[in-house]
Image (cartoon, grey):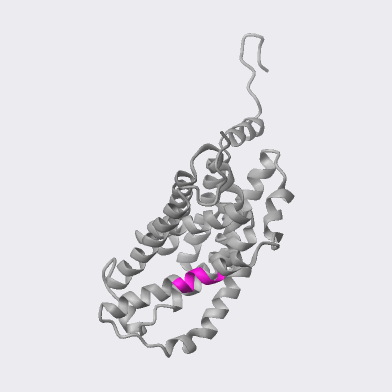
Amino acid sequence: MATALEPVRAPVPTRLRAWAGAHPVLAFVLLTYALSFPLWALAHLGGGFAAIVVGGLGPPVAAVLVTRLTGGSVRGLLRGLTRWRVPGRYYAFALGLPAALFGVVNLVLLLLGRELELSLLLERAPAFLGTFLIVATIGGGLEEVGWRGFALPRLERAHSPVVATLLLGLAWGVWHVPLYGTPAAIVVPMTLAFFYTWLYNRTGSILLCLLLHASFTPAQDFLVLLPEDALAHSGLVDVTDLVLLGVYVAAAAALVLLTRGRLGHPAPEK
């Protein structure tokens, strides 16, 4: 029992709630890692695809838990998943941007002397569609509840859209390292994050970000129109990797310039 001279300490849950309320994004990121990383370690030890899928639910679960812990509205958080009434041009962006970027990637590879196989488009179409559906339903698309629905708006309250995107992209990239284990696991998400920021800021729709995610994953897997043996390499990067990253960075930089760094976020009132 505490005496009158001893400081009264708040119960741990109360202190945790206060800390999470003061640092909601950090709490979300740490909890996301804590939920995902052990499951992915289990997957590497033979846990199989199920452990990968369940580990991928770390961001939405963490977002819901931190929202509840800090007294926020879970219904309000998840409302973005049903926000589908947006102008058609945003659906075109979400569904078409990855294909457009990979069109540029293939064009650059052609100019560099690589021989493309256009027949691969039809050959890989079923796998492309299947991957899209998996990512949009049980796969990586659900991450967007956490990264964009929860974290991005809170970061943009304290930072410019560009800085908020870089911070979120870094956290998102580190989260991917156990899955891919390469520098690209950090660099690529940090670059792609700019497209998601613009789309979310313009629509407020987690659903549209989910569709963008579901479009990017199969595009990266199937839209480089080189045979499998031409894609295999033993080093960290090769020409195809550099071209892909260069196109991503150039497109992200163009988006920042065209939006004057606002990335779809309303300018502050004067």
Left or right: 4 with respect to 184? right
- Tell me which segment is drawn in magenta: 95-100
**Number of numbered tags placed on the structure image:** 0
| Residue 97: in magenta span | yes
The extreme top residue here reads 5
Q: Which of 127 and 264 is in front in this view?
A: 264
In the displayed structure, 134 sits above or below 63; it is below
Which residue is located at x 62 percent, y 56 percent?
A: 203
Position of residue 260 measured from the top left corner of the image (x, y, whole percent): 45, 48
In the displayed structure, 261 sits above or below 36; it is above
Q: In which quarter of the image is residue 104?
A: bottom left
Position of residue 221 measured from the top left corner of the image (x, y, whole percent): 45, 75
Which residue is located at x 41 percent, y 64 percent?
A: 180
Position of residue 97 measured from the top left corner of the image (x, y, whole percent): 50, 68
Q: Nearer the viewer, residue 80 or 204?
A: 204
Left or right: 176 with respect to 108? right
Position of residue 184 measured from the top left corner of the image (x, y, whole percent): 37, 61
Which residue is located at x 53 percent, y 37 percent?
A: 158
Left or right: 240 with respect to 123? left
The quadrant of the picture occupied by the C terminus is top right
The extreme front residue here reads 270
Q: Quadrant of residue 182?
A: bottom left
Left or right: 259 with respect to 233? right
Which residue is located at x 71 percent, y 39 percent?
A: 71
Q: In which quarter of the image is residue 68?
A: top right
Q: Main secondary structure of the magenta part?
A: helix
Q: Is residue 232 visible?
A: no
The quadrant of the picture occupied by the N terminus is top right
| Residue 107: in magenta span | no
In the displayed structure, 260 sits above or below 85; it is above
Q: Is residue 207 visible?
A: yes
In the displayed structure, 83 sits above or below 91; it is above
